[in-house]
């Protein structure tokens, strides 16, 4: 049985999911047969931690996915699509390579992010934002227009 709920911003997402899971855990497999899909990755970590704390013992948790990982799972398991997606590390490496090829005045942070290690946190954020824009269906032409309209403060 699927349970879909629309929550107001004032409701606690993890608490609501835990309540739904506890009410439906009378199946022979318990929570292990449940699947939870969150809008992002952080709620999954909080849910697993809280479930373990509440149980006070080892449990087999439900399958918990972020929406992007759930879509990847569906593509692999049900559509048998095996294409290699770019993971976060590869994407940041590509972004860093692009960053190093830019002129100094175009680079994010000027000369501050000169190594992959210093660029990594910024690269993760850029990659995450690019994923969100892709999910939202923003056309490349529109994105280019939006980026051109942004001016950054000078570091001088």
Image: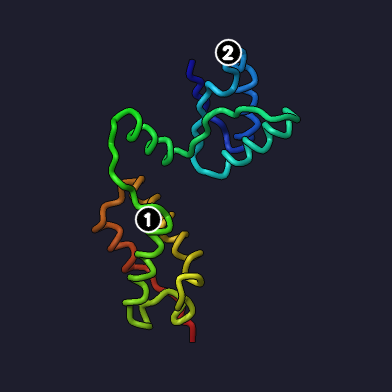
| Label 2: which secondary element | loop
Label pair 2/1, CB-CB below 8 angstroms: no
Q: Give residue 130's mark.
A: 1
Q: Position of residue 67 (x, y in %)?
A: 44, 38
Foreground: disc 2 or disc 1: 2
Task: Depth check: give the residue in front, 153 or 66.
Answer: 66
How much space separates mark 2 and mark 1, taking CA atoms? Answer: 40 Å
Q: Nearer the viewer, residue 67 or 89?
A: 89
What residue does disc 2 label? 27
For the point 32% across and 77% down, the residue is: 101
Q: Nearer the viewer, residue 154 or 48?
A: 48
Name above or below for residue 103 compared with residue 82. Answer: below
Label 1 crowding class (10 Å Cα cut-off): few <14, some 14-19, many 20+?
Answer: some
Residue 124 vertical placement versus 57 (above, below): below
Q: Is residue 100 left or right of residue 83?
A: right
Residue drawn 56% across the image and 23% down it? 32
Number of numbered discs visible in the structure rendering = 2
Locate residue 11: give its quadrant.
Answer: top right
Name which residue lies at 50% across and 70% down. Answer: 117
Neighbours of disc 2 within 10 Å: few (<14), some (14-19), many (20+):
few
- Look at the numbered disc 1 and give the secondary structure of its residue: helix
- The residue at 63%/40% (across/down) is 46
Would you identify the image quadrant in which residue 54 lies? Answer: top right
């Amino acid at each position: 049985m699927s349970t879909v709920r629309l929550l107001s911003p004032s409701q606690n997402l993890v608490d609501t999911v835990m309540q739904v899971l506890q009410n439906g855990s009378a199946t022979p497999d318990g929570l292990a047969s449940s699947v939870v899909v969150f809008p992002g990755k952080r709620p999954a970590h909080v849910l697993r931690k809280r479930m373990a704390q509440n149980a006070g013992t080892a449990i087999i948790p439900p399958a918990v996915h972020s929406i992007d990982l759930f879509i990847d799972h569906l593509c692999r398991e049900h559509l048998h699509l095996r294409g290699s997606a770019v993971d976060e590390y590869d994407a940041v490496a590509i972004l860093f390579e692009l960053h190093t090829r830019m002129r100094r005045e175009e680079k994010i942070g000027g000369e501050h992010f000169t190594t992959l290690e210093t660029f990594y946190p910024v690269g993760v954020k850029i990659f995450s934002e690019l994923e969100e824009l892709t999910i939202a269906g923003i056309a490349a032409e529109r994105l280019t227009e939006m980026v051109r309209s942004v001016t950054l403060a000078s570091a001088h």
